[in-house]
Image (tube, rainbow, N blue to C red):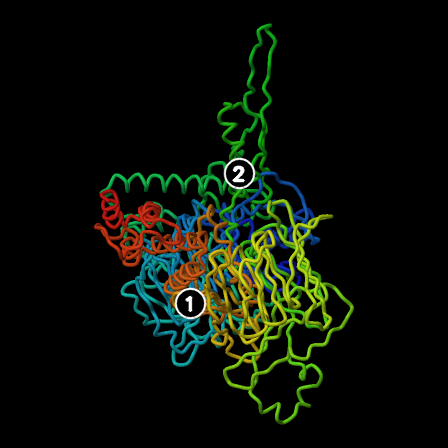
Amino acid sequence: MRLLKPAWVSHEGKPIYSVDIHPDGSRFVTGGQGDDAGKVVIWNMAPVRSEADENNKEIPKLLCQMDNHLACVNSVRWSWNGTFLASGGDDKLIMIWQTGRYLGISSSFGSNAVNVEQWRCVHILRGHTGDVLDLGWSPDDSMLASSSVDNNVYIWNAKKFPEITSVLKQHSGMVKGVTWDPIGKYMASQSDDKYLNVWRTSDWQLETQISEPFEECSGTTHVLRLGWSPDGHYVVSAHAMNNNGPVAKIVERDGWKCRMDFAGHRKAITVVRWNPRLFTRASNKDATKLKQFCCCAIGSRDRSVSIWMTTLKRPMLVMHDLFNHSVMDISWSSCGYEMLVCSSDGTVAFFQFEKNEMGDPMSVDDKEQLHKKIYGTSISTANRNVATSIIENPEMLKIQQQHQMKKALEQKSNSGEKPPPPPLIRKGDPATEVTSSSSLSGQSSVAKAEPTRVDVLKQQVETRTKDGRRRITPLFVAAQVDIGGTPVPFGSTPLKSSSVAPANVATLALESRTSEKTTISSAIVSPGNKSSNTATLSKVTSLSSPVRPSQSSQASTQSKGDSTTSSPATISVKRKVESSSSQSKRSKKDKEAPKTVTTSSSASKQKSDDKVERDDADVSFHTSQSIALPYPSPQKTLSLKVAGATLDSSVTLQLENNLNQSASNLNVLKCTQPAKLVWETCITSPGIALAGNRSIACVACQDRSLCIFSSSGRRILPNLVLDSSVSILQCNGYYVMVVTSRGGVYIWDAQKRTAVVKNESVLPILRDSEVTISRAAISERGYPVISLSTEASYTFNADLGVWVQLSSPEDPLQLNSDFKSCYNTHEVGKSHGILATLQGQTSRFSRPVGRLFRSNSTRPQTATISHLENQISSTFMLGSEKEYHFWFMTYVRYLVQEGIEARLRDICSELLGPSFRSTTWEPYILGFQKRELLREILPIIGTNMRLQRLFTEYKEQLSIL
């Protein structure tokens, strides 16, 4: 046995969390932490095996360095055929790499590393909401499993990246390891929730859950990389406990019994990796008989590595103090005689064994014959037994065909045209293994086959004119995809590409258009994300807080839209006594008095250097049920620019207050255009707030009255006398909203001359004296929207007579909701409205890392359904048609995806309505006809074969009505 630690295999002192040897044995990959991001490095195996090659400057050690990950890389895994490399990290992403077709020396950006090989990220898999901790390819490379801190295991369709085959959500803790059954029937995962789950790959349901060996375990390991033996008999877990000691528990496939374990390590076991080869050795009793066995390597937090044989009761090898920190990952070569081990101290150890130490390896064919003998099948002959369903409805058949065609087109658009995959290279195939001697010289032991040339120059289109001259039509030649096939062992003839070949013109046109397509499915943005924060309240006037009387601000301008108001900067307004003295200097009486609720409000003021003191603004009501909101004092001039009668025009509302104390003084409100007076009118009391749009103009006066004028200056309503001074004034269309200093909310429809909301107090939503109103708005349907300093938002429903919560900070339902897979890329724009803006403000201040560990994902499906139902109810309360339609369709897609028939049946029954005439059933909802919505959701229901009876039932009833 040889043991060495190559010092040049390093991430510049940073931790290495994963290592994997390529199936052909010519290279290996490490993943871990880089300087500012995650790092994936591909190394040459020859300098590790040979000291001569290590000292030979002509033989490079580093083949390629990739720094695409934004955070630490936790797992790297080669596919079994050697074509792809998968990497996952703390940035929640999984990247699929493939060798580049154009080979040449380059350097990694921001690094001194020289790349001899070129690797390209061909797919980015998005779906996890937490750090990706482990990856595992299925034995036939058709699927990729990934585990994450988000408590989920994602199964990706490797033949159609980035398609998701299934999401396994039964774990309630961080999933830290995955492994596959060698014949592909099962997949196992281990989590911090003290469970080892075994899943059936036929339907992705639980086969069994094992918990007893892990009841005393604690989550002290970074990973829990369990392993499945190559003969399929055993699953060996990572960290388990037996008699208060750490062990690797052996789970038998027959009955999933846990009667044995690998013991001896002093600390928790982090990784178990089986040798991919089965070995044979002559029996001690009878030399003519061969006994077969498997070999397993175990790494622990005690910095040691042990190697076990299934025929021995004690370990074959134990290596103590090999590293300074915990062992993180282990990888065996496909020949079975070499092993790499990495540690979080940033070093890698190499083990090389002799034949007399390990035994004689079985060939791949012999191993597959053994699988057939034991299980009746092997991975090379196994066919997935998908239950065939008979489609009973021709409409259902048509929908299924359209759905499959749509998925194929989306996949083609996402991935683009790519050359056919190269022949598979099986791990352990003697024809593809690289022996130690061939690697020393850097030569390949396999035939140097010329790669298939992809020819892109097409046959030119040539015509003849009447006079016999040739006319050649120029054709666009798309750039060739820079993706090669399976990487050849280093030192072989490099891949070549050609740009000359004949082809037909139709194919060129198709490929040219395909190459220009861009992927938009990965750019789906949830309404709570930052991008949705840019959606302004174009139809809903936003409000900022007020400026104290001693301050001033410029009037805001809104040249487009239906609502206009002034928007000074947000500040917190305190009582006058608090601003002049510190908290500690308050009088005893002041301290004992009940606290009043203070808030910020809005008013427009012209810039002025004059400091106007206010004596009556800091009003306190010393009762337990009172509110004192600050309100502005009159300024000499107030001006506001609003939209005019046409879309591209604007006018300026200007209020000139006569501040002289005289009963005969008048205050003038003017509407002007550049160098032109449109109209003017007079008001009796100085104005303190001004709002307007292309329909109306409103003035709140010092005498607690409100004046409303039409766009032509005509007084629409008489002076409205309020219970107290106006703290907030808003308008949208013909709707006018006022919040008084006593916390009363009024809304009038100036066109119909009716009250929508009558003096409703904001006291129920201001539960704390420190809570302030940060924003106020009125929707185009006349609903008030109040946002507080706690980042919660409310609206008042006049029909129900109560305040309704629209959003709240750190909403547990939103944190645990996962509905991104149900997005329709064509409807994402419809989700941007008032609700998206309100919830976007909340998400801006959230702490993703903190809420990730605080969120409870034990019931993700229930949380998602509850969150979507809340969104639908909120958009209905706000009367936001586009947002309502978006969330309703997203809700239906999620129910169809999860196969929840009961709720879908309830929705369909409500939309269908009675078959007879009824005075109680309302056929419309927010302007949408219910039966038209039913016709819209039936094709979505038809995409799930399990719901075809539901589809047929309501399709037939709808056709009768």
**Secondary structure type for disc 2:** loop
Residue sticking out furthest to the top:
467
Amino acid on which disc 1 is placed: Ser
Residue that carries the numbered disc 2 in the rendered image: 517
Residue sticking out furthest to the bottom:
588
Graded by Cα atoms within 10 Å as few (under 14), some (14 to 19) or many (20 or more), the crowding at tag 2 reads: few
Real-space Cα separation, disc 1 to disc 2, in angstroms: 37 Å
Give the total of numbered labels.
2
Residue sticking out furthest to the right:
609
Quarter of the image where one finds residue 813: bottom left
* Front position in the image: 232 or 790: 790
* Front position in the image: 827 or 551: 551
**Horizontal placement of 686 versus 328: left or right?**
right
Amino acid on which disc 2 is placed: Lys
Mark before the other along the chain sequence, 1 or 2:
2
Quarter of the image where one finds residue 846: bottom right
**Horizontal placement of 940 versus 834: left or right?**
left
Q: Residue at x 42, y 76 (%)?
A: 217
Residue that carries the numbered disc 1 in the rendered image: 857
**Secondary structure type for disc 1:** loop
Residue 544 percent across, percent down from the top left: 61, 65
* Front position in the image: 542 or 535: 542
Res. 349 visible in picture: no
Q: Residue at x 60, y 62 (%)?
A: 33
**Horizontal placement of 769 versus 677: left or right?**
left
Q: Dots 1 and 2: beta carbons under 8 Å?
A: no
Label of residue 540 in the image:
none
